[in-house]
C-alpha cells in the first residue's frame, strides 16, 4: 500500500475517549469526504446495479478485514458479535446473487494489513463502526425504491435502533484499549484509503 503523508502525527496527544473522538474526526474528515464523493451512491437516483456493485466490494473487504481483526485475541470478544458479513450475504442474496456467486466474489487482500498494529486497528474499526451512522441516512434515501428489500439494505444499518448504543459501546471499548491517537488516526486514514482504492477502482 502506498504510504500516506500524515502531517497531523505531531499533534498533541489526546488521552480521553471524547478527545480521541474529536481527534479522529478532525484528522480523517478529508479522507472520509473523499471516499463519500468517490462512491457517490446517493447523489443521484438510487440504482440497483450500482448498489449491488458496492455491496459486492464491501463483501470482499469485510471477508479479509474481519478475519484479520478476529485473529487478534484482544479484539475477538468485542468485534466478533459486530460482524457484518451476514448482512452483506443477506443483502446480496436479496439483490439476486446466489450463495455460490457470493463465495466467488473477489477479495480485498490489502485489508488484512489494517489489523497489523493494534492501535492502528482501533482506528480501522472506528471507520467501519462509524459507517453505521451514515448508513442510516443511506437507507432513508433508498426508501421507496422498488428494488430495495423490505426493511432496507441491512449492511448499512446492521444495528437498527441500537445504532447509538453500539456506537457508545465502541467508545467505551476504545477507552479500555487507550490507543495512541496518532496511530489510531493513521489506521483510520489507511482504512479510508484502502476502501477507496478497492471500491472505486
Image (tube, rainbow, N blue to C red):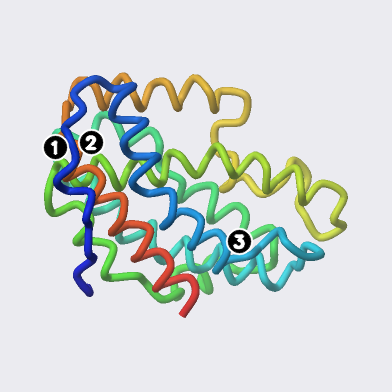
Kindly report the distance in space between the C-alpha atoms of the residues bearing marks 1 and 2.
Answer: 5 Å
Please tell me the numbered disc located at residue 76.
2
Looking at the picture, how far across and down is residue 157, in whole percent? 59, 40
Looking at the picture, how far across and down is residue 83, in whole percent? 40, 42
Disc nearer the start of the sequence (1/3)? 1
Kindly report the distance in space between the C-alpha atoms of the residues bearing marks 1 and 3.
Answer: 30 Å
Q: Quick one: 5 or 137, which is closer to the camera?
A: 5
Residue located at (53% from left, 67% from top): 56
Q: Marks 3 and 2: in contact by CB < 8 Å?
A: no
Q: Marks 3 and 1: in contact by CB < 8 Å?
A: no
Residue located at (74% from left, 40% from top): 151
Apparent side of residue 95 relative to residue 101 in the rendered image (left or right): right
Q: Is residue 81 above or below residue 35?
A: above
Q: Marks 2 and 1: in contact by CB < 8 Å?
A: yes
Residue position for label 1: 73
To which quarter of the image does residue 81 belong?
top left
Q: Is residue 191 above or below residue 76?
A: below
Apparent side of residue 127 relative to residue 159 in the rendered image (left or right): left
Q: Quick one: 58 or 94, which is closer to the camera?
A: 58
Please tell me the numbered disc located at residue 100.
none
Residue located at (30% from left, 25% from top): 19
Dot 3: element: helix
Please tell me the numbered disc located at residue 92.
3
Looking at the picture, how far across and down is residue 144, in whole percent? 87, 49
Kindly report the distance in space between the C-alpha atoms of the residues bearing marks 2 and 3.
Answer: 26 Å
Q: Residues within 10 Å of mark 2 (few under 14, many from 20)?
A: some
Dot 2: element: helix
Disc nearer the start of the sequence (2/3)? 2
Looking at the picture, how far across and down is residue 139, in whole percent? 70, 45
Image quadrant in which the N terminus is located? bottom left
Q: Residues within 10 Å of mark 3 (few under 14, many from 20)?
A: many
To which quarter of the image does residue 5 belong?
bottom left
Amino acid at each position: 500500500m502506498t504510504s500516506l503523508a500524515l502531517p497531523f502525527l505531531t499533534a498533541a496527544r489526546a488521552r480521553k475517549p471524547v478527545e480521541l473522538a474529536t481527534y479522529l474526526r478532525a484528522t480523517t474528515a478529508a479522507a472520509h469526504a473523499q471516499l463519500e464523493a468517490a462512491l457517490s451512491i446517493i447523489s443521484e437516483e438510487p440504482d440497483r446495479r450500482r448498489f449491488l456493485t458496492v455491496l459486492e466490494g464491501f463483501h470482499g473487504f469485510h471477508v479479509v478485514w474481519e478475519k484479520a481483526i478476529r485473529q487478534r485475541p484482544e479484539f475477538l470478544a468485542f468485534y466478533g458479535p459486530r460482524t457484518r458479513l451476514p448482512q452483506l450475504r443477506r443483502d446480496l442474496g436479496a439483490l439476486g446473487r446466489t450463495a455460490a456467486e457470493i463465495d466467488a466474489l473477489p477479495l480485498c487482500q490489502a485489508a488484512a494489513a489494517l489489523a497489523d498494529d493494534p492501535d492502528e486497528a482501533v482506528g480501522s474499526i472506528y471507520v467501519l463502526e462509524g459507517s453505521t451512522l451514515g448508513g442510516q441516512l443511506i437507507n432513508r434515501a433508498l426508501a421507496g425504491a422498488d428494488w430495495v428489500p423490505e426493511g432496507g439494505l441491512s449492511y448499512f444499518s446492521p444495528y437498527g435502533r441500537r445504532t447509538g448504543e453500539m456506537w457508545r459501546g465502541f467508545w467505551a471499548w476504545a477507552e479500555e484499549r487507550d490507543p495512541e491517537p496518532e496511530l489510531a488516526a493513521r489506521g483510520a486514514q489507511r482504512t479510508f484509503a484502502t476502501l477507496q482504492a478497492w471500491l472505486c477502482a
